[in-house]
Image (cartoon, grey):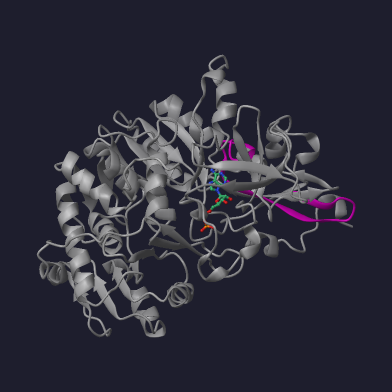
């Protein structure tokens, strides 16, 4: 027997219809690429998104067309997303931090027909446009006065283009499984792979993100997504903030400590989300200036492991709750978030910090398990490592074009490529990327644990642990360290600092001090490059 409830397809543009109805005057404040702070409301967002849809349709875009964006977080970028989705198109965020050749490869693979780009990225666009045959039109996200001279034919200023529409567009009545958005993984290893979100997955993900033990945002919040829209959809905040009617503050291209602080302060931001490196810059700025964070209530930190010392500083020095989170592009991206369940109430401050440092537990809508190499499920005992696999309505079931099929199994589980353990309370902790784990004498050593402890040393700015070949143990850990400016911690002091914090046989065999550690386009340490660089490194015990 079927239920007798209404068919109400879960469509993304219903989110901004709702926002315009329920919270029409709530602001979206952006640091524009041209410089000044600009303000609009959810009512404006709705009208301007309809104009985008109308203009795209007039340009000949049809449902299913891929509409690329190469842009910072701004209100304009958001209206391009909603306009594209509302006419059945697929917004496709491009990561400007990739090499131009990679961006062009991704655009050709996705067959992007249309591109919205920020002024900042004109040099990249001029390089790649000639090698993307599918590209029919480029709209620069600016007004006529700022439109640059360019050798590219047919460039048009967004505001002029948009002014040709009346905003009377009727959203398409789509099937909720229609593709809505697209984002490629960065392709640190192999070619980038396309993840194709649907209206349904985006809406369900946004609802999941709003839950109290997830992001937990409300109409009373002022939300600053520092995490870029081109990095895994700004973790869904472009959908969850309008869904609950929260004020949005968009940082544009400026993510240094002083610029972020300025927005936190002047707009009275209560909630923000970013990768650890951004927070590192902010904390440094606060320490240098003695400023405080009276309005900020909560920060979500993810994308790579959040060091314990960062959680402690935010909470103890500034009274800000840290929610450590894990996810990936393939998961829309939220996977787990770390809030304390009542079972943790009895723990002392350090015990709570032990929990908060984990990547957290899954909200409804994310199923997870850990398995051994034979796909046998491993216990949730907080110690046994396994490959982390996930399922859910906002998890990819295939990559665009069929790449990477081996990561999906017949029962619908997606192999994340991460290694983790899960404790009896449901808290998951990532110990490594499967390809980064150090295998010493057949046992696994977690590089993330080593790095976390090393960056707890006051002289260490950044640390990366990699496995290097060893005659007896196959591999042993080498710690690669960037010191803080003007500090000079030595190997012995650092290893003494680490002693007692992990098993003795986990302690690195050597420390290499470097000026810089290489990062990927999404801010993660590029272990493959480090491994290559230290391929012939001789550990002390192996040296003649
Ligand atoms: P990309 O591969 O494009 O950088 P993602 O941002 O989707 O894409 O990266 C997802 C990966 O980032 C995860 O599989 C995991 O390895 C890592 N990651 C994300 N959040 C965390 C976290 N809190 N702690 C440790 N690793 C994390």
Query: Bounds of the magenta span?
Result: 453-477
Q: Please check the rendered image and state whether residue 539 is part of the magenta-colored stretch, yes or no.
A: no
User: Looking at the image, can residue 216 be seen?
Assistant: yes
Of 326 and 316, nearer the camera is 326
Q: Position of residue 58 (x, y in %)?
A: 19, 75
Q: Position of residue 489 (x, y in %)?
A: 63, 41
Query: 155 or 261: which is nearer to us?
Result: 155
- Give the side of residue 382 with respect to residue 84, left or right: right
Relative image position of residue 288 (x, y in whole percent): 38, 38
Residue 534 percent location from the top left of the image = 71, 61
Residue 23 in view of the camera: no
**Which residue is farthest top?**
346
How many numbered dots are placed on residues in this image? Answer: 0
Q: Residue at x 22, y 83 (%)?
A: 154
> Is 228 positioned to the left or the right of 397 in the image?
left
Camera-side residue: 100 or 88? 88
| Quadrant occupied by the N terminus | top left
Q: Is residue 117 left or right of residue 425?
A: left
The C terminus sits in image quarter: bottom right
Q: Nearer the viewer, residue 61 or 500?
A: 61
Picture quadrant where residue 26 is located:
top left
Magenta stretch, main secondary structure, is strand
Which of the 4 quarters of the picture holds residue 35? bottom left
């Amino acid at each position: 027997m079927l239920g007798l409830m209404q068919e109400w397809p879960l469509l993304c543009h219903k989110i901004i219809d709702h926002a315009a109805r329920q919270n029409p005057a709530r602001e979206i404040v952006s640091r524009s690429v041209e410089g000044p702070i600009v303000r609009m409301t959810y009512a404006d967002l709705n009208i301007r998104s309809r104009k985008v849809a109308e203009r795209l349709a007039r340009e000949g875009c049809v449902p299913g067309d891929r509409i690329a964006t190469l842009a910072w977080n701004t209100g304009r970028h958001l209206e391009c997303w909603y306009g594209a989705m509302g006419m059945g198109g697929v917004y496709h965020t491009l990561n400007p931090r990739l090499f131009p050749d990679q961006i062009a490869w991704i655009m050709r693979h996705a067959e992007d027909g249309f591109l919205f780009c920020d002024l900042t990225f004109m040099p990249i666009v001029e390089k790649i446009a000639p090698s993307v045959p599918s590209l029919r039109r480029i709209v620069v996200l600016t007004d006529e006065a700022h439109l640059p001279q360019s050798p590219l034919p047919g460039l048009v200023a967004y505001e002029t283009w948009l002014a040709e529409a009346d905003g009377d567009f009727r959203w398409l009545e789509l099937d909720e499984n229609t593709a809505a958005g697209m984002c490629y993984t960065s392709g640190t290893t192999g070619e980038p792979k396309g993840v194709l979100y649907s209206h349904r997955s985006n809406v369900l993900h946004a609802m999941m993100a709003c839950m109290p033990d997830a992001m937990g945002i409300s109409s009373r919040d002022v939300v600053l997504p520092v995490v870029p829209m081109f990095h895994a959809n700004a973790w869904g905040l472009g959908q969850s903030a309008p869904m609950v009617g929260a004020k949005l503050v968009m940082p544009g291209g400026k993510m240094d400590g002083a610029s972020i602080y300025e927005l936190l302060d002047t707009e009275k931001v209560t909630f923000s989300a970013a990768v650890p490196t951004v927070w590192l810059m902010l904390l440094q700025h606060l320490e240098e200036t003695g400023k405080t964070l009276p309005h900020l209530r909560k920060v979500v930190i993810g994308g790579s492991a959040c060091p314990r010392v960062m959680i402690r500083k935010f909470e103890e020095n500034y009274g800000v709750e840290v929610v450590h989170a894990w996810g990936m592009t393939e998961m829309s991206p939220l996977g787990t978030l770390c809030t304390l369940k009542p079972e943790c109430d009895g723990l002392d401050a350090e015990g709570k910090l032990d929990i908060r440092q984990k990547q957290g537990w899954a909200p409804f809508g994310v199923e997870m398990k850990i398995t051994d190499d034979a796909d046998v499920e491993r216990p949730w005992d907080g110690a046994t490592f396994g490959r982390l696999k996930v399922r859910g309505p906002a998890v990819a079931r295939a990559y665009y074009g069929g790449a990477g099929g081996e990561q999906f199994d017949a029962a619908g589980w997606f192999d994340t490529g991460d290694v983790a353990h899960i404790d009896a309370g449901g808290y998951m902790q990532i110990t490594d990327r499967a390809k980064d784990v150090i295998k010493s004498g057949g046992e696994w050593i977690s590089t993330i644990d080593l790095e976390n402890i090393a960056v707890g040393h006051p002289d260490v700015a950044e640390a990366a642990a990699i496995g290097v070949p060893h005659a007896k143990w196959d591999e042993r850990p080498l710690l690669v360290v960037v010191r803080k400016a003007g500090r000079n911690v030595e190997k012995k002091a650092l290893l003494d600092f680490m002693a007692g914090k992990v098993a003795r046989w986990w302690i690195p065999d050597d420390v290499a001090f470097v000026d810089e550690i290489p990062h990927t386009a999404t801010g993660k340490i590029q272990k493959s490059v480090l491994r290559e660089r230290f391929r012939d490194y001789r550990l002390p015990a192996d040296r003649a």
